[in-house]
């Protein structure tokens, strides 16, 4: 009996310690890879930045834990994508940090600049919008730490230079390409990039929602378009099952048509392995450019 009581007390002690363990505090909380990576680049070693969405998780269906809510409220700045993408954030009563819905800043600019696509739900796939996002992040970082304004401004300029260089590289790739259309085995999430670059990205599912069910007619329609355009490459989104892709490949292989699969990363999230390696938004965009060059040449 005495042994059981000791074990019970030990168990209760473990639970108590777990419940009372302090929640780690971060200066900046982000919900998606674009703002997480940009905020880290700008903040440097002056402020801590945390990605509240776990790596490898679908951002559209991500849920916050009670500990996550505490972490958010203990921060100084919350940067989230939009109420449509981050539905869990829009339902919270947040006390403490400055709260920035980045989409509202992109959309607010729409009336003043019609040369870029600001209306897409997936607005962050546009280079121009990423540059704008970086500036918005900088403007709010200096609100929570004005003493290091010069440091953050220098980092922002480096970010903008890198984004501009990658954008120019892709524009040149498009200008020299033999085709202006690629095929994408995912939902319609790359429209902002397509509009900005003057290319057509024909998606398997013409729906902005990734959870939209894929139908047999949609698969057959994409197969038909691939054949009509003699496409040699099929692009796939990040972190998604390749089951449908393998179905398309098998159907085409039966007609002696070989497809090479390339990733076109939509910057929703990255894998745990990529996160641990410190993969940045610049690494992702650079790889996208390499893959798009290959796909648009269609050699």
Image (spheres, rainbow, N blue to C red):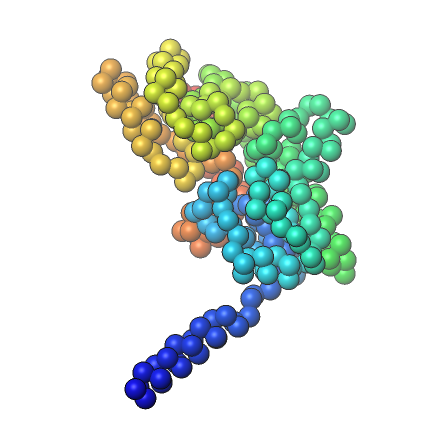
Q: Position of residue 221 (x, y in %)?
A: 38, 15
Compared to 271, does 76 lie above or below?
A: below
Q: Position of residue 209 (x, y in %)?
A: 50, 31
225 and 135: which is toward the camera: 225
Q: Farthest residue in the top direction? A: 228
The tally of labels here is: 0
Whether residue 294 is visible here, answered yes or no, is no
Q: Residue at coordinates 38% horizontally, 11% vertically from top-left? A: 228
Quarter assignment of residue 249: top left
Q: Is residue 151 left or right of residue 82?
A: right
Between 287 and 13, the one lying in front of the other is 13
Q: Where is 53 relative to 200, above or below? A: below
* Foreground pick, 232 / 117: 117
For the view shown, which residue lies furthest in the front direction? 1
- Quarter of the image with the N terminus is bottom left
Residue 117's place in the image compared with 284, above or below, is above
Q: Residue furthest bottom?
A: 2
At x 54%, y 61%, the residue is: 67
Coordinates of residue 245 in the picture (x, y in percent): 33, 28
Q: Left or right? Give the position of 191 relative to 56.
A: right
- What is the quadrant of residue 254 in the picture? top left
Q: Residue at x 64, y 28 (%)?
A: 119
- Give how far across and how far down residue 203 sits, in percent: 45, 23
Q: Is residue 140 visible?
A: yes
User: Looking at the image, which residue is at 40% across and 31% down?
Assistant: 236
Q: Quadrant of the C terminus?
A: top left
Q: Nearer the viewer, residue 197 or 252?
A: 252
146 left or right, relative to 290? right
């Amino acid at each position: 009996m005495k042994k059981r009581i000791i074990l019970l007390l030990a168990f209760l002690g473990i639970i108590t310690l777990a419940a009372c363990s302090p929640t780690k505090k971060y200066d900046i909380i982000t919900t998606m890879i674009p703002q997480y990576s940009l905020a880290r680049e700008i903040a440097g070693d002056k402020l801590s930045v945390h990605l509240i969405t776990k790596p490898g998780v679908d951002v559209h269906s991500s849920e916050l834990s009670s500990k996550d809510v505490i972490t958010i409220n203990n921060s100084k700045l919350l940067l989230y994508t939009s109420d449509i993408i981050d539905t869990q954030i829009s339902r919270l009563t947040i006390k403490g940090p400055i709260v920035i819905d980045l989409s509202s800043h992109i959309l607010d600019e729409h009336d003043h600049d019609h040369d870029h696509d600001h209306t897409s739900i997936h607005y962050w796939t546009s280079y121009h919008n990423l540059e704008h996002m970086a500036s918005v992040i900088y403007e709010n970082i200096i609100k929570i730490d004005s003493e290091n304004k010069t440091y953050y401004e220098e980092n922002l300029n480096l970010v903008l230079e890198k984004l501009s260089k990658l954008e120019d590289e892709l524009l040149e790739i498009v200008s020299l390409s033999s085709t202006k259309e690629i095929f994408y085995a995912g939902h319609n999430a790359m429209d902002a990039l397509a509009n900005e670059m003057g290319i057509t990205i024909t998606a398997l599912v013409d729906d902005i929602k990734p959870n939209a069910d894929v139908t047999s007619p949609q698969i057959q329609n994409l197969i038909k378009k691939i054949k009509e355009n003699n496409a040699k490459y099929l692009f796939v989104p990040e972190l998604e099952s390749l089951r449908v892709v393998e179905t398309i490949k098998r159907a085409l292989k039966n007609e002696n048509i070989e497809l090479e699969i390339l990733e076109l990363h939509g910057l929703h999230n990255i894998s745990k392995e990529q996160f641990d390696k410190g993969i940045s938004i610049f690494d992702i965009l650079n790889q996208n450019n390499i893959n798009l060059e290959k796909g648009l040449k269609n050699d």
